[in-house]
Image: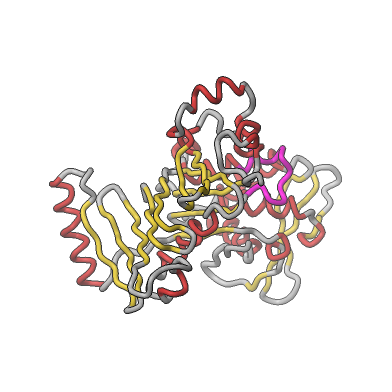
Amino acid sequence: MITEIRYKNFKALRDVTLPLGRFTLIVGANGTGKTTAMNSLNILKNPDKPSWREIASVDSNADGNTVISWVTENIIYHETWNSKGYVNRYEKNESTSQNTHETILEALEKSFEEIGKKPILNSVIFSFDAQKIVEPVSVRPNIELSEDGTGLAGVLDQLRDSEPERFEELNRELESWLPEFDRILFETPKDGTKAFLLRTKIGKHKIKAKDLSDGTRLALAYLTLAYLPNPPQIVAFEEPERGIHPRLLRNIQEAMDRLAYPENYGEKREPVQVIATTHSPYLLDLYKDRREEIVIADKDENGVHFERLVNLPNIEKILQEQDAPLGDVWFSGVLGGVPAQL
């Protein structure tokens, strides 16, 4: 679990730290570094791919460094790029006990010797595309859900065959999310391909994926991801409210919670670290009692900065005085993270 990511001269993030937990909801205006921070996960998966100039802040000196440091409970990993190339190093996280450090560092040094690099982050940034979600897919083993939702039919078909009890649980949950439907079905549009359908509760009509509304397609993608037996280690969502009716946002929240807090849903797997960005006051309202999970992204004369909602000065007093839903308070601008007024 990453506790924070620190940025130095990385695109719009000049010198800033993003605090993270099991679940983190980042809210802010356009241009406040939310997408840049999310995209850094892809950089950290393959840090030797980009050149320094591709990721450096626009006014970085030719002899300067771009650094992204990701911090876990035990280790701080430093990824550094400059005009001479890329290097990585690690150090102890001083907040952890010395005995634990010795064990962790010995294992880490061994992994560096054996595989020549640090552990790889298993992260996926999902930004579902309603058109991609319904595309028929070639039948193949170990199919995975792509960032844009491609492969959903194959993932569902695989889940039905390998985890039938989990697939049935997903179907029951489908009725809660989309009451007009009662079951996921499949068809073979042509040899070697699969597509999914939804069956209506009344009349038992089979509705092809391509005839479903965009919102229904997107909802099914989120629901499926939440029921995967082995989801990625880190999952990020760009504005999960896009294309979703506000009444379904609580279901989206539950899907993200199932990933991040599996023990609350009877799951035995390890928690997934979930990061989401939003512009939706409706989604923000759902976290009014979970303020420690909210990060405000803002920008001033000193650049972009991230801060937990609970750490804002006088936050409790502000919320009491406003006496309004959290989304409305944020929308008003008193918390920051909204477009600047000229």
Would residue 244 be counted in the magenta stretch?
Answer: yes
- The answer to whether 57 is drawn above or below residue 32 in the figure is below
Q: Please, which colouring scheme is shown?
A: secondary structure
Observer-nearest of 252 and 20: 20
Name the residue rendered at 41%, 45% in the picture. 19
Q: Residue furthest right?
A: 203
Q: Which residues are magenta?
A: 240-252
How far from the left and from the top, in percent, is residue 62?
Answer: 37, 75
Would residue 160 be counted in the magenta stretch?
Answer: no
How far from the left and from the top, in percent, is residue 182?
Answer: 74, 45
Residue 246 visible from this viewpoint? yes
Q: Is residue 159 left or right of residue 52?
A: right
Name the residue rendered at 49%, 50% in the picture. 301
Q: Residue furthest bottom?
A: 84
Q: Is residue 142 left or right of residue 91?
A: right
How far from the left and from the top, in percent, is residue 289?
Answer: 53, 28
Name the residue rendered at 61%, 23% in the picture. 322
Residue 1 visible from this viewpoint? no
- The answer to whether 338 is drawn above or below residue 290 in the figure is below
Quarter where residue 122 is shown: bottom left
Name the residue rendered at 57%, 58% in the picture. 126
How far from the left and from the top, in percent, is residue 285?
Answer: 61, 33
Observer-nearest of 319 and 113: 319
- The answer to whether 49 is drawn above or below residue 210 in the figure is below
Number of numbered discs on residues: 0
Q: Is residue 108 left or right of residue 320?
A: left
Observer-nearest of 88 and 341: 341
